[in-house]
Amino acid sequence: AAAFWLGYSMGGRVALAAACRHPDRVQRLLLESASPGLPDQTERAHRRAADEDLAASIERDGMDSFVERWAQIPLFASQKRLPADILARERRVRLQATAPQLAAGLRALGVGRQPSYWSELARLEMPTAVVVGEEDAKYLDIGRRMVEALPDSTLHVVPEAGHRVHLEKPERYWSVVRAFARDGATGSAS
């Protein structure tokens, strides 16, 4: 039976892969800060090498070091506005993973490992909502390009949010999800 698939970032790429490979199983699709991947083989090879280096550093230096470095990358700068208790909770959640688990996930599911789905977007017929934070310039650009390629899609840009819209603006995010789940149509952009 077809289902409503929702995915964030890497999970969004996995949900998009499911839609491309098994469109009969995806009734509608909501992608938050997600990408169809890297279409250029050379770019993907460079990303695989960078991901391997990161995986090795996670295994060598441990989770504490990785979580500290990861929180400092520009992609997550907007999260610094979040209350201290939320940041502490997110840190605890990240530290629940082990270094071998995270390294294996990066090696198996990194953007350099997965195929590009850009060329398949035009054939996806299910309603698709693309949700991005207005402060996430990279994924805002990707989201706009995805919506241009997807036949039945809408871009939802959430003000004052970065990459993790669901964490930074949960009320706005969940209102988009509820409306999309209830109506099954992309509706108008926000």
Image: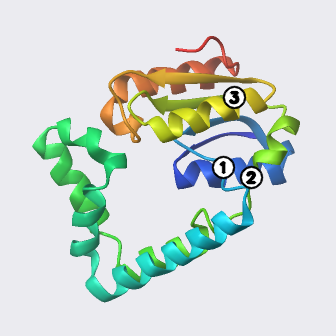
Residue 120 is left or right of residue 49, and the answer is: right
Confirm whether residue 82 shows in the render.
Answer: no
Q: Which residue is mark 2?
A: 18
Residue at 26%, 56% in the rendered image = 71
Give the residue type at disc 2.
Answer: Ala
Q: Report helix, strand or loop for mark 3.
A: helix
Q: Residues within 10 Å of mark 2 (few under 14, many from 20)?
A: some
Proximity of marks 2 and 1: CB atoms separated by less than 8 Å: yes
Proximity of marks 3 and 1: CB atoms separated by less than 8 Å: no
Q: Position of residue 97 (x, y in %)?
A: 35, 72
N-term-proximal mark, 3 vs 1: 1
Q: CA distance from mark 3 to mark 2?
A: 18 Å
Q: Quadrant of residue 108?
A: bottom right
Residue at 32%, 25% in the rendered image = 160
Vertical order, 67 against 78 (above or below): below
Q: Quadrant of residue 125?
A: top right
Q: Which residue is mark 3?
A: 147
Q: CA distance from mark 3 to mark 1?
A: 16 Å
Give the residue type at disc 3.
Answer: Val
